[in-house]
């Protein structure tokens, strides 16, 4: 019975191709919009998670001052001191690595080429803490860090833009007014979650940076990589207690520093992206409602056009529920075809948008299944009233219809 109804539905659709295409349009657009937006949103979430992971594994970042939006950076608040760093280094447990650092935007020059870049003054442990990988050379030693030797490690952007294909090892570049020997190059990390180029970077010993670049001993950031995600809350609490003690923050007073858990920031950003995706998907779903109304209108027209046919079927013995099933199946078939076309179009749009926006494309089979099922549900909901109208026709009145 159902298979016969499906064949009749397909025959009716082929008989009125243009009308069927126009009927499908609302469903196609609605399904395509929902799938495209949800897929792009999921890619954006994956992108955020990936970029946040590039900042380092199980990262905690302390900096002076109250919390502010954006990436960790220095502050005009009372900066950290070497005493703070040593207290953390001696007092923390379950820590994989930690490093103190400060940053400044400086022009870097090599030959006739120049580049505005971020200069980081830090300790040798910085590269382990931040999960950097060397493509050549290596880091400076502890003795270099203590003596303030003019050595530096550069990122992939500077290798490409500043040295323009030359072997960077042993080259002397000018960082601000200071000549500096390149002893290592870093593997690419790309854009950060905050939009900055992580590879446009020069890393040098903290003492060298303080003496030759910053002209001060301030420490803007202390990065700590915990041994595992499970100990992050414990390490974060210990960092807070130690810094409150070394910075002489009295009980009841607000901290004059911030300790950020980067996994919490990533979760917050991911949650925000999810909410925005849901809102956009809900707006796009309105077009599905419009498409469903279009299905109902066309089915009502179809019932009016085929009144005599319905009367003949009823007169020769067809039951009302058979007529209802036929028109209901027609509506469902229309919606499912529209859903399948919309699904293909939606994933196509999502793939193109993902490529253009630089976010990963993730095919989600669940979304595809929901799209087809939802299309069928629309067919049932909006096709029931026209189908019921057809089934309730009086055969005598229907046969008299011209």
Image (tube, rainbow, N blue to C red):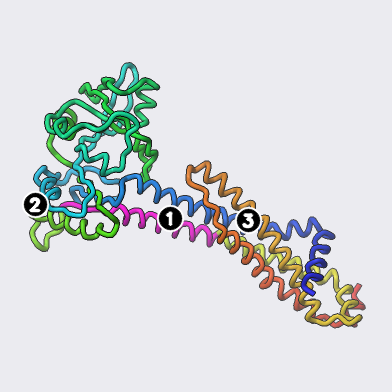
**What is the quadrant of residue 392 in the picture?**
bottom right
In which quadrant will I find the C terminus? bottom right
Q: CA distance from mark 2 to mark 1?
A: 38 Å
For mark 2, does the 10 Å Cα neighbourhood hold few (<14), some (14 to 19), or many (20 or more) residues? some
- The residue carrying mark 3 is 343
**Residue visible at 39% across and 22% down?**
164
Which image quadrant: the N terminus? bottom right
Q: Nearer the viewer, residue 94 or 288?
A: 94
Rendered view: 299 above or below 88 = below
Residue 274 horizontal side relative to residue 384, left or right: left
According to the picture, the residue beneath numbered tag 1 turns out to be 273
Tell me the crowding category of disc 1: few under 14, some 14 to 19, or many 20 or more residues within 10 angstroms, Cα based. Answer: some
- Residue picked out by circle 2: 246
Q: Which of the two labelled residues, at mark 3 and mark 2, occupies the earlier sequence position?
A: 2
- Label 3 to label 1, Cα distance in Å? 22 Å
Callout 3 crowding tier (Cα within 10 Å): few <14, some 14–19, many ≥20? many
Q: Please provide percent x and percent y for residue 290.
A: 64, 63
Place of residue 381 in the rendered image (x, y in percent of width and height, measured from the top left): 66, 72
Image: magenta residue range = 256-283
Q: Are marks 3 and 2 in contact (CB under 8 Å)?
A: no
Q: Secondary structure at mark 3?
A: helix
Q: Position of residue 280 (x, y in %)?
A: 51, 57
Q: Nearer the viewer, residue 151 or 331?
A: 151
């Amino acid at each position: 019975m159902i298979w016969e109804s499906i064949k009749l539905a397909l025959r009716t659709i082929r008989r009125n191709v243009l009308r069927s295409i126009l009927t499908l349009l609302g469903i196609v657009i609605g399904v395509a919009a929902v799938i495209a937006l949800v897929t792009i949103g999921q890619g954006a979430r994956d992108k955020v998670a990936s970029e946040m992971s590039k900042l380092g594994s199980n990262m905690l970042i302390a900096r002076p001052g109250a919390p502010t939006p954006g990436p960790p950076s220095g502050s005009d608040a009372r900066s950290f001191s070497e005493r703070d760093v040593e207290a953390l280094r001696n007092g923390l447990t379950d820590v994989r690595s930690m490093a103190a650092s400060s940053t400044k935007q400086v022009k870097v020059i090599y030959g006739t080429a120049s580049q505005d870049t971020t200069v980081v003054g830090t300790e040798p442990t910085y590269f382990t803490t931040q999960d950097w990988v060397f493509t050549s050379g290596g880091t400076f030693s502890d003795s270099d860090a203590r003596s303030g030797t003019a050595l530096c490690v550069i990122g992939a952007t500077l290798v490409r833009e500043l040295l323009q294909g030359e072997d960077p090892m042993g080259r002397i570049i000018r960082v601000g007014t200071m000549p500096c020997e390149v002893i290592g190059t870093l593997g690419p990390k790309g854009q950060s979650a905050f939009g900055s180029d992580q590879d446009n970077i020069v890393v040098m010993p903290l003492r060298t940076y303080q003496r030759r670049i910053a002209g001060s001993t301030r420490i803007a950031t202390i990065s700590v990589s915990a041994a595992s995600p499970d100990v992050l809350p414990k390490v974060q609490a210990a960092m807070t207690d130690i810094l409150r003690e070394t910075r002489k923050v009295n009980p009841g007073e607000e901290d004059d520093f911030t300790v950020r858990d980067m996994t919490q920031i990533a979760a917050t950003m991911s949650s925000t992206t999810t909410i925005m995706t849901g809102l956009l998907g809900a707006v796009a779903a309105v077009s599905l409602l419009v498409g469903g109304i279009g299905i109902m209108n066309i089915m009502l027209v179809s019932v009016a056009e085929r009144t005599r046919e319905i009367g003949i079927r009823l007169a020769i013995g067809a039951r009302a529920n058979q007529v209802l099933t036929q028109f209901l199946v027609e509506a469902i078939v229309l919606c499912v075809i529209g859903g399948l076309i919309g699904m293909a179009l939606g994933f196509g749009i999502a793939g193109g948008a993902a490529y253009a926006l630089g976010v990963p494309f993730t095919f989600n089979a669940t979304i595809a299944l929901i799209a087809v099922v939802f299309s069928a549900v629309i067919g049932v909901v909006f096709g029931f009233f026209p189908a019921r109208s057809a089934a309730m026709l009086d055969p005598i009145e229907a046969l008299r219809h011209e």
